[in-house]
Image: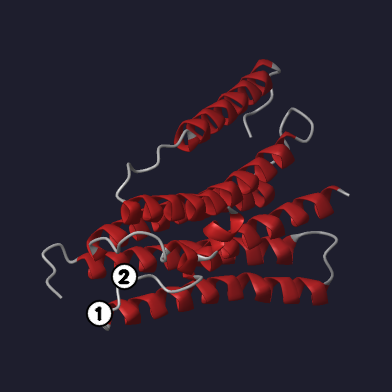
Amino acid sequence: MSDPGLQPERTTLAWRRTSIGALAVAVLAARAVLTAPGVGPVPGALLATAALLGWVGLLVLGRRRAAALRAGRPPVAGRTLPLAALIIVGYAVLGTVLVLVCLG
Amino acid sequence: MLRQWFDPEETRRVGNTPDYRFSLANERTFLAWIRTGLALVAGGLAAAQFLPPLPLPYLREVIAVGLLALGAAVAVRAVAHWTRTERAMRLGTDLPTSRFPLVLAAVIGAGATLLIVAVLIQAARGEPAP
């Protein structure tokens, strides 16, 4: 495809920046779970794993999107964008639950 | 309405496919909003674990939960805005306008003002700043 603005490459890089941001959030969330008083070791380990899996999920979404763009398929697939937003909501819910658990 | 937000295939059935470069620009705008949401969530998670207790009771918790809720709202709204923009481009209508950025800026400004007041109260009591 003719591409004077390197649009697919810029979009791939935007996805990459987003996964880097998600990694920072995943580490913060995992640390919050592991240091929160009142969260047992087993639920703590499970929640910390879930926090890191959120980052993996966003990474996979971005990678699949990059592969589609390289293959010359520009339309964004199915539920990619709602899933990305859902991962952010998941981190927000996890953080809110932790704050409330530490209070009570 | 909800169905429209979360089922992009539905959006794809109306109007004509625009120049793919416009759709990719819309996608990058969506991702910029997602990063904004991630930054707010990161701020909430950081406030929850690194802020010392503040002079007003529960202020730390209110800040943390407020930032987390804002982050989630930004992420959900990013999907809605992407969908509305994509529809407008397919139908050849004006791009959607939104008060959301204004509201977001006002809320963040109000939160920052609240924190400044809290720090000043602490300073006036002669306690060291947190």
| Residue A34: percent from left, percent from top | 72, 67
Circle on res. A12: 2
- Chain letter for mark 2: A
Residue B26 can be seen in this image: yes
Q: Is A70 placed left or right of B76 in the picture?
A: left
Q: What amino acid is found at the position of numbered circle 1 in the picture?
A: Gly
Q: Is residue B96 above or below residue A49?
A: above
Q: Is residue A79 above or below residue B24?
A: below
Which numbered disc, 1 or 2, marks the residue closer to the eye? 1
Q: Which residue is depicted at the point 70% across and 60% down?
A: A94
Q: Quadrant of the C terminus of chain B?
A: top right
Q: Is residue A25 above or below residue B117?
A: below
| Residue A42: percent from left, percent from top | 81, 77
Dot 1 or dot 2: first in sequence order is 2
Q: Are marks 1 and 2 in contact (CB under 8 Å)?
A: no
Q: Quadrant of residue B128?
A: top right
Q: Is A78 placed left or right of B32 in the picture?
A: right
Q: Is A93 placed left or right of B3 in the picture?
A: right
